[in-house]
Amino acid sequence: MKETFKKLITNFQERNFGTIVPRDYTIPTDTKKIISLIGVRRCGKTYILFSLIEQLRNKIANANIIYINFEDDRLFPIALKDLDLLLEGYYELYPKKRDEKVYIFLDEVQNIEGWEKYVRRIYDTENVQLFVTGSSSKLLSSEIATSLRGRTIAYEIFPFSFKEYLDYQNIEINLYSSKSISFIKNAFDTYLIDGGFAETFDENDDVKKRIMKDYLDLIVYKDIVERYHIKNQSLLKHLIKYMFVNMGTLISVNRLYNDYKSQGYKVGKDTLSDYLSYLQEAYTLFTVPVHRNSVKEEQRNPKKLYAIDNGFKKLFSISMSSDYSKLYENLAFLHLRRNTDEVYYFNQTQEVDLYIKTDKEYLVNVAYQIEDKKTFQREITALSEGMRYFNLTKSYLITSEKEETIEVDEGSIEVIPMWKWLLLEENQ
């Protein structure tokens, strides 16, 4: 294993990355903390590491950088005890580096049981700057919370945002230019349906779909079936299909249990709850609680269901046009969730789709089509009620095209197209 580590270290140090698309994350390369990047598979964590490594190569010797991908088949089977051979092999290659700071990047480290014990030990005893990535929120966050408490800064990484997608496509963001807006709106139509996984961006529709199916299989089998020894795979697959078809709708374990029972599935509520939890841990699925003043009250109410990327929906939907309202709402959720995990829906006499509470409070309703006067009035009434409850003077109604400012007793409601709302500076 030591010789394998030496080969991987050397091969990587000889590697040139080519063009790396910049992402909207500001991650320090020199800090006293361990840097952790967590997110769904294939969302770009590795390329963010490469970007950090490229920055470092401009400042320090390439030999002071170690990168290991723990999904490399040449490392299988690898156990916790083998990790000591990593630095042993490195210092045999570069004995003089024992007196210098070494930057170590451990990609998909959650594949090794007990990895956090090794990371903690070398963090405490060696002159190293550590970066780790993983595709499971539970495995990383629970281990970070125990063994690495106080030693790490964690960053959640998502597939490309709409702004990042426009940057990738070299589309200028100028909301005062008609030409720029034409390109932005055209790009939005694609992004809405195809999502933000970068490997799909330059492919045709058939290849995009195949890539997304491979991603989903990888998440399901690698992060869920293998890790949790899932026996009822048909139920898991059905649950995943349900999730993507019903993004933006309310869900409860009791309702799911009754639905599956009526379809002849032999399943317990605990199993369903576990499977939903595994999907969330793998960053495939998010559930959003209603906003209440107590956690117990939040838990008693159904949760809203959202998915990590709109692109998965087309794997299960024959026609996308009827699902635009769900795609819009899922996109709005993801946009807010990138900045905070304090995302809720609000329900008094009317439901407001999304409410966030960070350094600023924010209410959002999403309505793809609001030509119908009753629909429009319902959205405005719900937002007014929410503004009154939270004592806010501004909220947003996101649409496909309509744009205006509605004055209400509580303040103003900005009616704004989704593509434009996603690019507002205050949302970034």
Image (cartoon, rainbow, N blue to C red):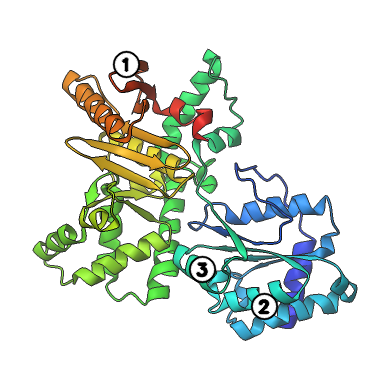
Image mark for residue 121: 2
> Which residue is depicted at the point 55% across and 14% down?
177
Kindly report the distance in space between the C-alpha atoms of the residues bearing marks 2 and 3: 16 Å
Along the line of sight, which residue is nearer the eye, 357 or 368? 357
Q: Is residue 278 left or right of residue 85?
A: left
Q: Could you tell me the amino acid type at mark 2?
A: Arg
Provide residue 387's location: percent of width, then percent of height.
Answer: 31, 30
Extreme-bottom residue of the structure? 81
- The residue labelled by disc 1 is 407
Q: Is residue 412 visible?
A: yes
- Tally the numbered discs: 3
Looking at the image, residue 310 sits to the left or right of residue 149; the answer is left
Q: Please tell me the numbered disc located at residue 145.
A: 3
Secondary structure state at the residue bearing disc 3: helix
Q: Earlier in the sequence, mark 2 or mark 3?
A: 2
Say left or right for 17 vs 48: right
- Residue 238 is tagged as none
The picture quadrant where one finds residue 80 is bottom right
For marks 1 and 2, give the CA distance.
59 Å
Q: Quadrant of the N terminus?
A: bottom right
For the point 19% across and 20% down, the residue is 372
Q: Secondary structure at mark 2?
A: helix
Q: State the image coordinates of residue 9 (x, y, percent, origin top left).
A: 75, 69
Which amino acid type is shown beneath numbered disc 3? Answer: Ala
Along the viewing direction, whichever of 7 and 203 lies nearer the viewer: 7
- 201 in relation to 116, above or below: above
Which one is closest to the eye, mark 1 or mark 2? Answer: 1
Rendered image quadrant of residue 267? bottom left
